[in-house]
Structure formats: structure tokens, C-alpha cells
Image (cartoon, grey):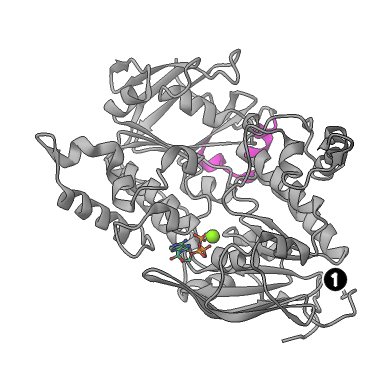
Amino acid sequence: MSEPILTPQSPIIHMDSTPLLEMRGISKRFPGVVALDGVSLSVGRGEVLALCGENGAGKSTLMKILGGIYQPEEGELWVDGKPVKIQDVNDSMRLGIGFIHQELNVLDNLDIAANIFLGREPLVTPFKLIDRKKIHADTAPLLKRLGLDIPSDTLLRNLSIAQQQMVEIAKALSLNARLIIMDEPTSSLTLTETDCLLDLIAGLRAEGVSIVYISHRLGEVSRCADRVVVLRDGKNAGGLDRADINHDNIVAKMVGREIKNTRLASDAPKTPGFLKVRNARSSRYPNQSVSFDAARGEVLGFAGLVGAGRSEIMKALVGLDEQGAAEVTLGNQSLRIRRASDAIDNGIFLVPEDRRGEGLVVGMSVRENTTLPSLATYSTAGIISKARETAITNEQIVSLKIKTPNAESLIRNLSGGNQQKVVIGKWLAMGPKVLILDEPTRGIDVGAKAEIYKLIRTLADNGAVILMISSDMEEVLHVSDRIAVMHEGHITGVLDRPDCDEQNIMQLAVGRTSPVSKPAFVA
Ligand SMILES: Nc1ncnc2c1ncn2[C@@H]1O[C@H](COP(=O)(O)OP(=O)(O)OP(=O)(O)O)[C@@H](O)[C@H]1O
Ligand SMILES: [Mg+2]
């Protein structure tokens, strides 16, 4: 249990071989679910331990036990070789454990500094007021360390999800934690930001800080982990030492089968110019406009760096941006899209990026969420047939392998990845003409990703237009027929399938032109 962590990657520098943390025989049940069943885990000093497993395997639950959010029914926690009890988040903080939770935990009406020092603000006498000067002064270097060039008095609501996630990371750093739990820290970060975080992890590791790293991006895991521990169905399913860590070995332990990731080719007939978008403008980039064509049966990928304006353009397109506008032609019909319901009536659906905020009602059941946008479809003469709703929902549960006790379970009790599947499922169920997916597989495990890609492809082959925003390079290359690359509010170029590679995308993403790129539409 207490073997020292020797890695080929770098020599051990921390001589004390007692693990910093040991979790022994941890069990946790929820109504209808055994989330954890006798799980053990140890983390050495200065070790980067990756925790892997499919959606619903129990990763977040295990970490929430460390944060005092849940109490286990069985098992023990040991820190520095001594048994400890963690009743609440203060116990956890006192033990030097910092968290970056999977669901963002920020208050969006407060600024960056206030979020970082929330609940432990330094006070100035005599009136015991919050020492704003100090929290801003202390925040600046944290942001700098993360390469975040934003003033510390920016309100959280004015930040992108990626930037909000960086603020959570800054908060964990500010606590001087000895152990930092990162639950999907890069799920909404792009390549550059991810690189920045991985460098930071290497730096923390060298300082002797331990990290538990949870991610479905197995490439990152292979890059940063000293050791991998895999959970399957709430149980330990083995582990890998540094020398054996690679994509295929992790997947084999996670799912016990091989997942093929060959590029999805499409031979289905296409109707070029079926969807025409002209002069789309978002309130974020009012002086830029975007025009493009997409064919029936086509998956048009949208790549670019965070802040390139991809989500904003799509919102304008479906009437979700009040100051935005777009001229949209579908088939030969020009559409008037003023509000979201106009888009939905015309069969144009958007699966948003911020699914907890915009895509789901967490207090409702899986069934209610699946059928929410399409009640008309499931009702006869205004009476909604619950049996019909349940049938549709059960189909989605099976085809997307949504892990839930049943269709009536509350969304908020599903694991992060399974919540995502519900959102995707509800739009797939509606047979869209145009489906816009914004980061469709964020937080979704490798097996389920492959399923979702197949569904996207099938939908396209059956005649839908798919517009897919993705910051996941592998994904955008894997699924797209063509890729439009955006930079600061406009399309820099479109790549045909033979020209789609990482280098060409990056070139256009940073705003340079490329000799191989094509125009986005035919005038
Ligand atoms: N508060 C809760 N009430 C009921 N069930 C829960 C609760 N929290 C988690 N679960 C269930 O426990 C299981 C493990 O969930 P957990 O969130 O730990 O998975 P995970 O490995 O983090 O998955 P993901 O990769 O999707 O984030 C799931 O079946 C989930 O639905
Ligand atoms: Mg989780």
C-alpha cells in the first residue's frame, strides 16, 4: 500500500513513503444505487493519481467523501498515516485538501477575487469590513500564474465557462492545498488552456503537492499521471503504473472491451447548400458577421479557440441572442427566426454548452427532461400520454446507456456524464432537420462517446444537417465532413475533409490564412 512512487518520468524527491492519503474499503449507497462498494485508494506525496472510469462509476462520489459532502456507510480515511474523520468541507480544508468540482461552484454575481476568497475573506478593523484591497492584491498573482489575463474585479457572469473553471483552479491554489482534487478540470478548456493547466500540475507536483486527476480525456491522463486507478460500477477495477499508462490500457480496464475510433466516413448522398446562413451576428461581436452553407447529411464541425464566438453565433442563429441576427434559408424556404420557439418550430435545435444552466431542469426527472421540448409530439388532443413519454425515455436510456435507476429518477442525482446524455437524448428523440451541438461530449466517457458519434452520423445520414462546435481536436477530426474554423468572431476558413488536420485547424484558429482553406459558402 505504501510503496514509494518511482516514475520513469521524473525521480522521486519526497522521501517520506507514508501515503498522504489512504481511503480503505469505502462504501456509499443511494436509494436504488450502490455508488461505491468497498473502494480503496492511496495517494502518495507529490503524486499525480488519475482516477478513471465510465460515467457513473463512482469517481465524483468517492471524491465528495473526501470533501465531507457525503458520509460513507463503510470504510476509513487515513491522512499522514493517521485515521481521520471528514464531517464537512472545513475538516477537509484543515487537512489541506482543495477541490475543483465537476459542477462549477461559482457565484456569478460576484467578481473573481470575491469568489476566490468566499467565506474566508480577510477583514479590516475597526468595522470588520472585507479587506477588498487585499483580496484583489492576492488574486492578481494567482491569475497570472494561470496565464489568465483578466482584471480581478471582473464579474463571474462576464466570463466564459472555461474562464470560470480557471477561477475554481485559482481558488484551490489560494488554499495552499497539499492535495488538490480536480474533477474534470479541462472539460471546458481548449488546447492552450489545457496545456497551461498540465504545466501547472507538473509544477505543483515538483513542489510536493499531490493531485487526484479525473478526466475522460485519456490523452491528458497519459501525459500527466504517475499512476492510474480505475473504478467500474463502484468497485476497484485495477490500476496502471506509469510505464503501462496509455489510451488502450486505460480503456481496457474501464470497459473491458476495445473501442474502435476510426474516422466516421459518410457515403450518404448530400444536398449542398440545404442550409444557408448569411450575415449572422452576435451581440458579442457586433461588427463581425458569419455566413456559411451546409449540406443535408453533412456534419460541419466548428473549431476555434475559446472566445472565438462559435457558441454566440449559434445562439444568434436560433434566436437566443436578442441583439443578434441571422438570415437563415432551409431548403428553399427563408425563415424568420426571432425567438427560440421559431427555430424549434422549423426543426432547428441547439444543444447548448452550459447544459446545467440551459439544457436541463435538475429538479425534474429523466423522463420530464427528455420529453420537455416536445410535449406536443407525445400528446393527443392536449393530453400527454405518460406511457408514451416513458417509452421514448426508456429508448433513450437504452440507446445512450444512461445510468439511472429508472426514468423517474431526478436528474440531479445522475452522474455528470449521464446528465449530458439526457440532454443529447432529448434532442435526438425529436428528429431534427438541423441539429446544433455545442461541445456535445463534454464529460462523457469513451464508450458513450463512440455511441453518440454513431448517433450523430446516423442522424446526418438520414438527412439532417449537423453543426458541431467542439474544442476537442480528436472529436472534431473524427466526426466532421468539413471543418469551419473561427477566430475572433469570424470564419477564417473552411477545410475539406482531406485537409482536415490539427495543424491546418490551429493555423486558422489563431487567425492566419491557409492555402488549403476554402470559402464558407457559394454566393
Ligand atoms: N446524490 C445522489 N443521489 C442518488 N444517486 C446518486 C447521487 N450521487 C451520485 N449518485 C449515483 O451514484 C453513481 C455514481 O455517480 P458519480 O457521480 O460518482 O459517477 P462518476 O464516476 O463521477 O461519473 P461521471 O464520469 O459521469 O462524472 C451514479 O449511478 C449516480 O447516479
Ligand atoms: Mg463525476
Local crowd size for mark 1, using a 10 Å CA cut-off: few (<14), some (14–19), many (≥20)? few
SS label for mark 1: loop
Q: What range of the chain is rendered magenta?
A: 495-510
Assess whether residue 149 is covered by the magenta stretch: no
Please state which of residues 249 and 147 is positioned toward the viewer in this rendering.
147
Which of the 4 image quarters holds residue 130?
A: top right
Q: Is residue 257 left or right of residue 331?
A: right
Q: Is residue 383 left or right of residue 369?
A: left
Q: Quadrant of the image for the N terminus?
A: bottom right
Mark yes or no: residue 25 visible. Answer: no
Q: Quadrant of the image for the C terminus?
A: top left
Name the main secondary structure of what is drawn in magenta: helix
Please state which of residues 483 and 89 is positioned toward the viewer in this rendering.
89
Q: Is residue 392 above or below residue 254?
A: above
Question: Callout 1, which amino acid?
Answer: Ser
According to the image, label 1 marks what residue?
10
Mark yes or no: residue 419 visible. Answer: yes
Q: Is mark 1 within 8 Å of ligand 1?
A: no
